[in-house]
Amino acid sequence: MPASLTELLQLVLNGFMAGSVLALPAIGLTTIFAIRRYLNFSIAGHMSIGAYAGYVANVSLGWSSSAALVVAFLVAGVFGIVTDRLALRPVLRFGLTLVAVASIALNLVLENLVRFCFGNDIRSYDIAVARDWSLGPLRIGPQSFAALLIAAAIMLVLFLFLALTPLGKAMRAVGDNPVLADIKGIDPERIGSIATFTAMGLCGVGGMLLGLATSLDPELGFHVLLSVFAAAVVGGLGSIPGAVVGAMFIGVFEELSLLAVQPSYRSVMGFVAILLMLLLRPQGILGSGRS
C-alpha cells in the first residue's frame, strides 16, 4: 500500500475516533440550544469539571474508570443546573447575546475554579498504559478506541431514550415547539432543567474521555471548544443527530488538514468549517433552518 494512502487512512481513522469524543459535548451544546434557545459556551468549563471529578474518583478514591465516568456525568450535570440558574437564567431577560457573553464569563470562572483546586500541573488517570494496536499498516490507540466505543454506547442510549421514553418525547416536543408543548401540559422549565443536566453531564463525560486519551489540565475543555462549536454548527444547531455527524466531519477534517498545514494551525480548521457551512448551507447538514 502506498505510504500516502496509508497516511490518509490513518488520518481518517484518527478523525473518527477524535470525532466520537467531540460528539458528546456537541450534543450537549445543541441540546441546550434546542431546549433553552441560547448558546451556552460554558460547556468547556463543564468538560473540565467532569474530567477532574472523574480524576478524583479514579485516582484519589481508587474507583474504576467506568465508575469515574458516572461521577463525571453526575458532577458536571449538577454544576450545569446550578450555574444555569445562578448565572445564565437571571440575565436571559436582557437578551440572548448577553446570555452567550455570560456563558463565556462563566466558562472562565469554572476553569479557574479547577485551577484553584488542582493547580496547573498536567495530570493523568490511573489506567494501564497499553501499546498501540496494529491493523495492517494502521495503528489504533487502545484508549482512543475505548473512548470511541463508550461514546457510541452513550449516544445509542441517548437516541433510544429520546425516541422511546415519555420524558424523551417530552424533550423533543419542547425542542420543536415550547408553546405548544406547554399547552399540552408539558412544563418547559422542568424539561429545560432536565435537558441542561443531561447536556452538561454529557460534556463532563466527554471531558473525561478526552482526558483518558490525552492528559488533564484546567483548559482541557477550552482546547476543543471551537471544534465542538464547529461540530454543532456544521451538523445543524438544535439537531442531535446533526451534532454527531458534524463531530465526525470536524474530527476527520481537522486530521486531514495536517496534510496541508502545521499542527499548530489545526484549531483554525474549526473556523474554516464554520465559514464554509455558513456559505454553502447555513442551516447545517441536518438542520431544519427554522429559528
Image: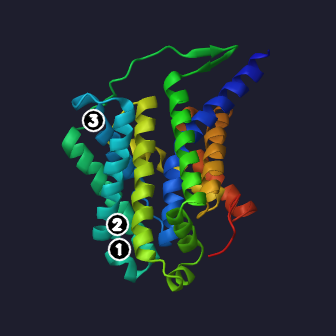
Give amino acid for label 2: Asp
Give amino acid for label 1: Arg
Mark number, residue 89:
1
Kindly state the secondary structure of the residue where label 3 is placed. helix
Mark number, residue 84:
2
Mark sitting earlier along the chain (3/2): 3
Q: Which residue is mark 3?
A: 57
Which color scheme did the rendering employ for the protein? rainbow
* Residue drawn at 61 percent across, 59 percent down: 163
Foreground pick, 73 / 269: 73
Which x, y percent locates residue 272? 64, 51
The answer to whether one can see residue 266 in this image is: no
Q: Do the residues bearing badges 1 and 2 touch, measured as CB atoms within 8 Å? A: yes
Report the side of 16 relative to 79 (left or right): right
Give amino acid for label 3: Ala
Distance CA(mark 3)–CA(mark 2): 25 Å
Report the side of 136 relative to 101 (left or right): right
Which x, y percent locates residue 46? 36, 51
Kindly state the secondary structure of the residue where label 1 is placed. helix
Report the side of 31 relative to 234 (left or right): left
For the N terminus, which image quadrant?
top right
Which x, y percent locates residue 7? 70, 23
Mark sitting earlier along the chain (1/2): 2
Q: In the picture, residue 43 is in which quadrant?
A: bottom left
